[in-house]
């Protein structure tokens, strides 16, 4: 009787295992089918990701295709929603929910947000990214990439006609930005693409074909620029603010967080006050050190600002920036090893180089990583030289912004242990779903968490100047979330926004004005840094309580990074074994 019960129990486990295997196999097959079709709908994104089947295509924004895309999304929503999550493995259960949320976001974009009707910037980015990925990313032989770029150039006139047909009423700031960006796309065709072709030994026939296609593409883009200026701009009255209803929905779909927009704003306001108090306590002894007296009759923010004004004078000379960043990366690597915070992959060295000219902008340094599906490609840490035509005043302002402490903070965020480390951990995860549909709050939240992790562990021997600069960076993260909400769900004016950034965020006017533009042109993304960081810190607190005396910071960090880049709520399920 006992043997019979054991046999029956074993058979039940076997049958359930087969059912799960069958369900998992069905899910995997459907994911593969969906992903290929998704990439066909979004060929430019596919090129960046590292899926190169559709490198010869531009995205299609025709009315017919947009309708077909919506129906296609709804059909897959129905298919994925039929899976019994309990019959899927834990990883597939999470991937299924990620896919359903991603599909819902895209349905919302097509049915309610309808950005293709009012945001000309999306068309600019398809053209610019679609060509630059092929020109600059060395994933295939150069001539093959050139031929695919040629095919995309040939599609530009038709693509521009789609844009003109779709765009009905756009915010003025979006139109003005699109006009400037359109000139950049013309430059890509006339200069970047042709220079790329000039480096190759190609047939006269191919060179002639490219020249004709570029001429037609340039003509189309020039006409488009005039259309934006003379036709769309005069008739457009759309507000750049999303409005509360659309903003709240977009936040739900984009952030994929358990926190509501109101909770995020309330948390940010409280964090701002708390961080100002922390900064003041650090600044008090530094004020006396710098000025030789107590700060009598000064409010908190004035004391902090006075100390920051002294710290930023500690900066490298222009010729020293590259070497300083290399030195900082070596220091961070050794610091992480000494503190046993994370296992670093030394087989994936970061290549520090001068930023290619076409990428030079406002930041002194930035990470350029290959797409998640690319194999054996280098990751670059680009360092921008100071423009030769800058005045001494511009140079000094720039160097103050990127003082020794800010340069180190930047390398923590962008490289080690920030984005660079998070990306190579993430790319080990076998899930294509998490590779392609990565979570912005998780990725940006980790980079902000990395900054805090270094401070908690005493970077630069607990130097209070480093702590104060770190908190200046963090207050910027907090204010980004406040701006995002109050601009798009409220009526915050430009002057109110600038005052908040300059007085309470200690930012220079030029930086604040640039952030105002970004906040007007985008929505939800500026909240991702703060939201993701708060979610990771809350998860760490829960994990510490769960582990008690057995909590290990290295184990937590590696566990957090080892499951791709899904929304933090799913990492919570995995780490807390919910």
Image (cartoon, rainbow, N blue to C red):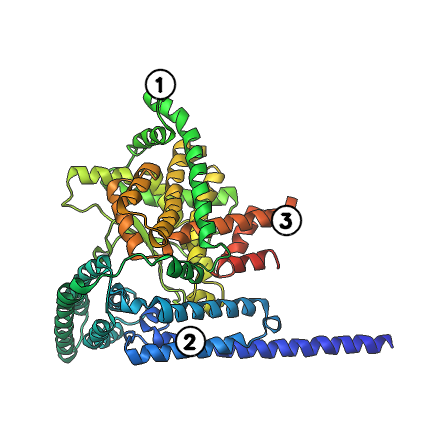
* Residue corresponding to mark 2: 73
Asked whether the residues under the numbered discs 1 and 3 touch, taking CB atoms below 8 Å apart as contact, a structural biologist would say no
**538 vs 184: above or below:** above
Quarter of the view holding residue 75:
bottom left
Question: Around disc 1, counting alpha carbons within 10 Å, would you say few (fewer than 14), some (14 to 19), or many (20 or more)?
Answer: few
* Residue corresponding to mark 1: 293
Q: Earlier in the sequence, mark 1 or mark 2?
A: 2
Q: Nearer the viewer, residue 333 or 45?
A: 45
**69 vs 381: above or below:** below
Q: Nearer the viewer, residue 427 or 218?
A: 218
State the separation of the CA atoms marked 1 and 3.
47 Å
Q: Earlier in the sequence, mark 3 or mark 2?
A: 2
For mark 1, give the secondary structure. Answer: loop
For mark 3, give the secondary structure. Answer: helix
* Residue corresponding to mark 3: 547
Residue for point 40% across, 39% down: 470
Residue 231 spot, x, y in % from top left: 15, 67
Quarter of the view holding residue 54:
bottom left
User: Is 195 positioned to the left or the right of 289 in the image?
Assistant: left
For mark 2, give the secondary structure. Answer: helix
């Amino acid at each position: 009787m006992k043997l019979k019960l054991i046999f029956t129990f074993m058979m039940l486990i076997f049958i359930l295992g087969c059912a799960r295997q069958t369900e998992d196999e069905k899910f995997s097959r459907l994911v593969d089918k969906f992903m290929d079709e998704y990439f066909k709908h979004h060929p430019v994104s596919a090129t960046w990701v590292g899926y190169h089947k559709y490198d010869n295509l531009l995205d299609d924004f025709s009315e017919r295709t947009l309708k077909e895309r919506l129906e296609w999304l709804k059909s897959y929503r129905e298919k994925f929603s039929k899976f019994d999550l309990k019959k899927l493995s834990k990883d597939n259960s999470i991937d299924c929910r990620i896919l359903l949320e991603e599909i819902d976001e895209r349905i919302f974009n097509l049915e309610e947000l309808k950005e293709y009707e009012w945001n000309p910037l999306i068309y600019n980015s398809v053209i610019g990214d679609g060509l630059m990925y092929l020109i600059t990313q060395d994933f295939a032989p150069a001539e093959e990439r050139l031929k695919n770029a040629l095919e995309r150039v040939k599609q530009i006139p038709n693509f521009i006609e789609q844009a003109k047909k779709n765009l009905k009423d756009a915010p003025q700031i979006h139109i003005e930005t699109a006009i400037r960006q359109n000139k950049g796309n013309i430059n890509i065709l006339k200069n970047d693409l042709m220079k790329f072709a000039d480096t190759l030994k190609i047939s006269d026939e191919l060179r002639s074909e490219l020249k004709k296609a570029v001429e037609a593409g340039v003509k189309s883009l020039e006409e488009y620029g005039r259309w934006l200026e003379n036709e769309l701009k005069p008739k457009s009255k759309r507000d750049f603010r999303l409005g509360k209803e659309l903003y709240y929905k977009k936040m739900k779909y984009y952030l994929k967080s358990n926190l509501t927009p109101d909770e995020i704003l309330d948390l940010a306001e409280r964090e701002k006050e708390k961080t100002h108090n922390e900064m003041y306590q650090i600044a008090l002894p530094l004020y006396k050190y710098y000025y030789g007296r107590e700060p009598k009759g000064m409010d908190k923010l004035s004391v902090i600002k006075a100390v920051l004004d002294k710290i930023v004078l500690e900066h490298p000379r222009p010729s020293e920036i590259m070497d300083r960043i290399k030195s900082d990366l070596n220091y961070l690597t050794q610091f992480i090893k000494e503190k046993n915070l994370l296992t670093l992959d030394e087989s994936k060295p970061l290549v520090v180089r001068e930023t290619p000219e076409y990428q030079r902008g406002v930041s002194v340094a930035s990470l350029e990583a290959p797409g998640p599906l690319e194999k054996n490609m280098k990751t670059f840490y680009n360092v921008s030289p100071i423009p030769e035509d800058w005045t001494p005043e511009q140079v000094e302002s720039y160097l103050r912004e990127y003082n020794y402490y800010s340069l180190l903070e930047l390398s923590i965020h962008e490289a080690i242990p920030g984005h660079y480390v998070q990306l190579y951990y993430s790319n080990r995860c076998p899930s294509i779903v998490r590779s392609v549909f990565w979570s912005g709050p998780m990725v940006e939240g980790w980079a902000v968490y990395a900054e805090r992790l270094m401070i908690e562990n005493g970077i630069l021997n607990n130097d209070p100047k480093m702590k104060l600069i770190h908190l200046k960076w963090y207050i910027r993260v907090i204010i980004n979330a406040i701006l995002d909400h109050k601009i798009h769900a409220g009526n915050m004016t430009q002057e109110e926004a600038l005052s908040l950034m300059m007085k309470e965020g200690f930012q220079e006017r030029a930086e604040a004005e640039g952030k105002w533009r970004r906040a007007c042109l985008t929505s939800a993304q500026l909240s991702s840094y703060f939201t993701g960081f708060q979610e990771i810190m809350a998860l760490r607190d829960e994990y510490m309580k769960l582990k008690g005396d057995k909590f290990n910071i290295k184990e937590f960090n590696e566990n957090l990074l080892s499951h791709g880049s899904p929304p933090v709520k799913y990492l919570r399920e995995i780490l807390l074994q919910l």
